[in-house]
Amino acid sequence: SLDVDNVTASLLDEKSKLPLIISPRLDDSLEFLCHWLVANRPWVEEQILNYGAVLIRGFQVNDAPEFERAIQSLQPSLSDSYRGTSPRSVFAGTKYTFSAADAPVNYPIAQHCEMSFLESPPKQLYFGCLQESRTGGGETALCDFRAVAEQLDGSLRKKFESKKLQYRRRHYNEGEKWTTDVGSMLSWRQMFGTSDKSKVEELCREEGAPQPQWIGQNNDTFYQEWQDEPFVRHPVTNEVVWFNHLQVFHWSTFPCELWYAFCRLHDARFLLRSIFFW
């Protein structure tokens, strides 16, 4: 039977209720999971809306192609278009499954809404852990950005609403290897899949993105600048959401994240790097 009752639903944390965990009750096979997701897609979508995230664990999903097959059972219309800031690599045998970031596992990345600076950001994001990290780091943190918007100090919220956000985005012709800025690791040629500047400009027009400027000594550095809103309304619930990349792009983020990593893992390397980058 593919009824909802044939899986177990539980919570990691009763206080935050984020995320809802779905695990097998009797059948943990990939085949069952795929058929169950197809049959119960509306129910799963409802839980994602209610809880903010759903964690599916304990099923026999052993590699990237199997992960992609399971996700396509839930969402057949995936996209492989990526205009984010982190360098990523597609997994063999898949079209839509990428590494989260081609950066050292101990590089902290601040919590954020995926590609929130785009005109049409993704509505959902799917993560899979096929192999647990053997070193410090690698975890995927979850955050309810509805709660962030609600808990912001009133005066600070008004300041954001009145002044807005100013984005400045720069990508080089070749991605940098030794940098504290993960975004600098991704070249504009990688991001757009072309070395033709006119094609890049055409893609920006089609996607409603600001037209780039070409700066630098050889006019081969991609640069965009625009103003954006710090909050949006949820497209279904109409709730106010903190929806931007301020805490990722701001210069102070990386040393702060290194400090938080040190407090969690008590690894002196994080502390030393935090002091160095301040």
Image (tube, grey):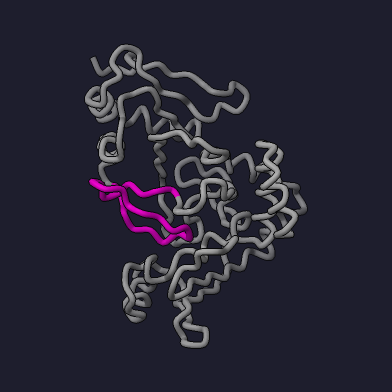
**Left or right placement of residue 35 versus residue 184 in this view:** left
Q: Position of residue 248 (x, y in %)?
A: 59, 56
State whether residue 267 is above or below residue 40: below
**Magenta residue check for 115:** no
Quarter holding the N terminus? top left
Q: Position of residue 161 (x, y in %)?
A: 66, 59
Q: Position of residue 207 (x, y in %)?
A: 37, 67
Q: Main secondary structure of the magenta part?
A: loop
Q: What residue lies at 62% left-to-right and 24% top-to-bottom?
A: 15
**Left or right placement of residue 126 versus residue 172 in this view:** left
Part of the protein shown in magenta: 78-100
Hey, which quadrant is residue 202 in on the image? bottom left
Q: Is residue 74 visible?
A: no
Quarter holding the C terminus? bottom right
Q: Position of residue 25 (x, y in %)?
A: 35, 13
State whether residue 268 is above or below residue 47: below
Hey, which quadrant is residue 33 in on the image? top left
Q: What residue lies at 32% left-to-right and 79% top-to-bottom?
A: 196
The foreground one among 97 and 268 is: 268
Q: Is residue 52 visible?
A: yes
Q: What residue lies at 46% left-to-right and 73% top-to-bottom?
A: 210
**Magenta residue check for 90:** yes
Question: As drawn, which residue projects farthest toward the right?
Answer: 155
Q: What residue lies at 58% left-to-right and 67% top-to-bottom?
A: 167
Hey, which quadrant is residue 261 in on the image? top right
Question: As drawn, which residue projects farthest toward the top?
Answer: 26
State whether residue 73 is above or below residue 88: above
State whether residue 126 is above or below residue 110: above
**Left or right placement of residue 31 versus residue 235 in this view:** left
**Left or right placement of residue 88 versus residue 52 in this view:** left
The foreground one among 209 and 233 is: 209
